[in-house]
Amino acid sequence: MINWLAVIIAMAVCLAIIIVRIFIGPGAPTRLVSFDTANTLVVTGLVILAMLFKDVVFIDVAIVYALLSFAMTLYVAKYIQGDKF
Amino acid sequence: MSALNIATYVFIGIGLFFNFVGAFGLHRFPDVYTRLHAATKCTTFGSIFLILAVVMQSAGMWAIEGAHSPQSIMTIHSILALVALMVTNATSAHAMARAAHRSGEKPARAVVDDLEGKEND
């Protein structure tokens, strides 16, 4: 059997490194880039959690999370570049 | 240890390595464009390999348990999540780079900006 718990702990360490950049990053575009990277890692972590807990619901949540974070990134990018809505 | 488990460990190793490269690239690079380059590419590549490891394990259990096992749903939905991740990451990286340039972010130590004044397209 694969030790998925060790994989998800390593992903959590990686996510913590990225969240530090969200807090200290200068300016809104750097924070947006860090937030999008954190979203990618959360989607991957949800798929791994589905394998760890043997529950399919996590993967459905991961698909919806990926699409909603994509919409969030596009709208915050439009806000940062100064477009009218 | 079967060959499937060895291949899964190799995929997990590659995926975690590239995710850590992306996370450290966010701290090592000087401006937003190089950070975008490091973070987006590396975490997309690492996530592809980590989800492929999950797909390989669940497809192996699907082959053992027969056609009607619940692992079939896990395999197919993991592939769907992978497709959604690959499409949306590339598109949002382009959107973030354009937003950063139009909001006035300058590349670090840059002398010439070829996109200067080309704002209407």
Image: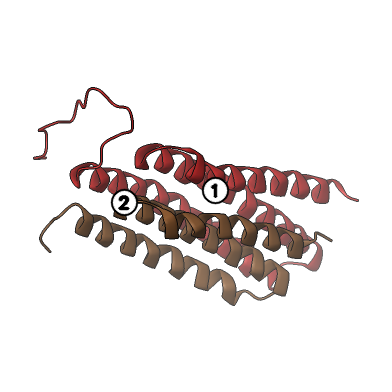
Q: Nearer the viewer, residue A32 or B3?
A: A32
Please name the residue shown 30% across and 55% down the image.
A28
Q: Which mark is residue B55?
A: none
Residue wearing tag 2: A29
Q: Name the quadrant containing residue A80.
A: bottom left
The furthest residue to the right = B1
Provide residue A32's location: percent of width, then percent of height.
35, 56
Residue wearing tag 1: B23
Supply the letter of whichever chain is brown.
A
* Left or right, residue A44 beside residue B3: left
Residue A52 seen by the camera: yes
Using the image, determine if residue A73 lies above or below residue B114: below
Q: Name the quadrant containing residue B22.
A: top right
Q: Chain of mark 1?
A: B
Please name the residue shown 60% across and 55% down the image.
A14
Please name the residue shown 54% across and 48% down the image.
B23
Provide residue B2's location: percent of width, then percent of height.
88, 49
